[in-house]
Amino acid sequence: MGLRSVKEYVKSLRDEGEVYVYGEKVNGVTTHPMLKVCIDTAAVDYEIAGNPQYRDLAVVNHPKTGEPITWRRFSTSPKNGNLP
């Protein structure tokens, strides 16, 4: 699949199924006030990955496929005590 751009990431969220917040159906996931903050925060990873200056901080190779993927430091299990 390769790395996604911010636009591709946001579009993929629009393509997903139904989303509910506090029991109410959300009509616009990417514009909902509570969800937009989360989406914008996650989008930073894609923005950094697309910037050659910071690519090494945000991109790693998938351990099984070797394909470049966006790496989220706070959601990836470390393999050792060393930083990449």
Image (cartoon, helix red, strand yellow):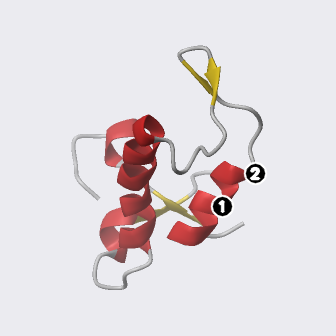
Look at mark 1 in the image and give the residue it sits on. 11
Number of numbered callouts drawn: 2
Q: Quadrant of residue 27?
A: top right
User: Relative to 20, is 26 above or below?
Assistant: below
Quarter holding the N terminus? Answer: bottom right
Q: Is residue 35 above or below residue 9?
A: above
Q: Secondary structure at mark 2?
A: loop
Q: Residues within 10 Å of mark 2 (few under 14, many from 20)?
A: few
**Label 2, on which residue?**
15
Amino acid under disc 2:
Asp
How far across and how far down the image is residue 37, in percent? 37, 45
Give the image location of residue 61, x and y in percent.
53, 62
Asked where in the image residue 9 lies, by quadrant, the reply is bottom right
Q: Is residue 31 above or below residue 65?
A: above
Residue at 40% in and 54% down: 40
Residue type for callout 1: Lys
Q: Nearer the viewer, residue 18 or 58?
A: 18
Asked whether the residues under the numbered discs 2 and 1 touch, taking CB atoms below 8 Å apart as contact, a structural biologist would say: yes
Question: Measured from the top left, where is residue 71 in percent x and y?
Answer: 43, 55
Q: Looking at the image, which is closer to me, 42 or 70?
A: 42
Nearest the viewer among 69 and 28 is: 28
The quarter of the picture where the C terminus appears is bottom left
